[in-house]
Amino acid sequence: MGRDGYAGLAILVASLALFWATLGLERHPMVPIGPGFYPRVILGITAAMALGLLVSDVLARRRRVVGAQAAPAGQRPNYGLVVAAFAVFTVYVLALPWLGFRLATLLFLLAMPVLLERPAGVRGWVIVALVAVVATLASHYAFESYLHVLLPRGRWTGF
Amino acid sequence: MFDLLGTALANVSQWKYLLPLILGTAVGAVGGALPGVTITMTVIVALPFTFGLDPLQGLVAMVGIYVGGSAGGLVTATLLGIPGTPSSIATMFDGFPMAKKGEPGRAIWLGIWASCFGGLLGGVFLIAATGPLAAFALRFGPWEYFSLFVLALSMVAGLVESSLLKGLIAGMLGLVVTVLGNDPMMGAPRLTLGVGFIEGGIAFLPVLIGVFAFGQVMGDVEKMRALKKASEALAVKMSLAASQLAVLREILTRPFLLLWSSAIGVWIGVLPAIGGSAANIMAYDQAKKFSKRPEEFGTGVPEGIIASEASNNANVGGSLVTIMAFGIPGDAVTAVMLGALTIHGIQSGPLFISQQPVLAYGIFAAYLLAHPIMVLAMAVFARFALHVVTVPKSLLYPVVLVLCVVGAYALNNTMSNVYVLLVFGVLGYLMVKTGLPLAPFILGVILGDQIEINLIRAIMSDANPMLFFTRPISAALLFASVASVALALWQHRRARLKERAADTADAADF
């Protein structure tokens, strides 16, 4: 099974699970159709289409002639880096309520550029640090002082 | 209308509005020029900065970004052969060869002026068509609205380049997002998945920011090495001097090309959720078909640049018509603008122009003023463009992500929208990897509640479901919806047959 097949399968399972969850919804006397009517229509159509995607992928794979070439190693997407980048971003999001915007953002802006491309020499590290400090302070100042957006305060840090 | 427009032009010419417009246009030009940063991402990044402004200030800034971004992409497309945005891909076909021939100034200025004229022609359509279309839409009842939204979704799903089925699934997934949370009519709890903050439904802006920003950023993270090589190859110095009179003559002596390309741009803009990326390719293709020397296209002919740039800026006008007359975003940028309106408690749709004339005509005025500002901004910016585009993505993208977080957080000052951003960021990336198009998904998220509300209102008014098919406008819209899906099916089938025929021919040659 290829990507389309897996995508179809995932969507099919999710839509059927949600469809099942709508079965327990009670109708409201004021509205002729209950709160579950529209979701059931949407989820039913989605499930049918996802099944179509799954089946078409399986059939296409059966028909396909063997011999498709894999991409050369240099052109292969670096999925490890993507996963790591998502992980760093997730940690940043989870840390925001505890460390506050300023500290969490500073750490994120130090960690993410280093992850994406290791700085070359002292100059590279200084640039990363400088961008992190300036971007953190500038965004904090711009949003809090000028645009009146109250950014997250840290439960641990108090700021 | 002209009185209101005159007043709006005077209003927007005040520094209070002119400054955000100038800044927006300049930021748009820079964002558009940066390869890997689309206009959508630029407007997403700018969104949180508009929260503290008054609605018109925020909207004129966004209009500026849209106009500036639509033109900004031409700089790198022309000078480096790397389109800054998808809407400048066709500009590269002739702009880059012209620059390589030693005429980079001519190529750039042809693009800038064509963008300006195309955009202004789009503006004429915007101003002339929005009012009548909105008045027409006022005749709509829930049946017609339901059918209109269904048409919008089916058209978008059919117009995407990948498979029709994937387009439809993406649109349906967008609708699924809107059924999570309390039902919009009576507020009955529904599919909250045990997550407290979903009860009120999922706000579409964090969803939009998440899928678009992460879909793009992580897509580039995958190939960081390739991007680095591209940015290292930019150390080029060239003169951008050109005779403005000669360039203007070149454009204005081709009035049919300019008008036709602008008309294509406007038409593509009016169609929901497809934008300049389709307009510039289609206009280029048409220019080539109408040309007496089609074989010269791709070697640096002015017609290619004029067609592409006139269409992608005219497209902005078309997109604004759809959102202002019907409340349906013409593309992702107008979807963000719709979000900005919602944040300020303003409802977009047919009543917008009559209930919010200051805002509506302010948008018209900002759109018109943004074009001369764009010309000036590009005159200044084009000289430095090659330096700007060398900003490493490893430094730029983390800052972009921080601004996305701020944008999501500032919607209601809670972390819940940031979590939504994260979840839909992952989903957006997975959708990109599985070839599920983002445009129908986002349109589904935006229209989902309205589709449900209008469906239930229609049934509450009259339980007869045949009214959807017997009311003339509703029937016509539903017929158009079916026709658009059928047309898309036919087009996809034809493309597949062509591919197979080509494969067979290749095999026979072998």
Image (cartoon, rainbow, N blue to C red):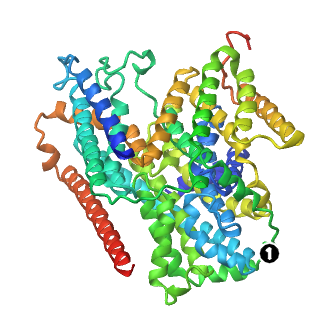
Camera sees residue B40 = yes
Location of residue B297 by image quarter:
bottom right
B479 over B346 or under it: above or below: below
Left of B351 or right of it: where is A152? right
Q: Position of residue B311 (x, y in %)?
A: 52, 67
Residue name at image x 60 percent, y 48 percent: B220
Query: Residue at label 1?
Result: B241
Q: Position of residue A40 (x, y in %)?
A: 22, 30
**Amino acid at circle 1:** Ala
Q: Position of residue B301 (x, y in %)?
A: 61, 82
Residue name at image x 55 percent, y 59 percent: B86
The subunit letter for the residue under badge 1 reads B
Of helix, strand and loop, which one carries label 1? loop
Location of residue A103 by image quarter:
top right
- Which residue occupies the extreme bottom position in the image? B292
> Closest to the observer: B342 or B213?
B213
Q: Position of residue B417 (x, y in %)?
A: 52, 26
Location of residue B85 by image quarter:
bottom right
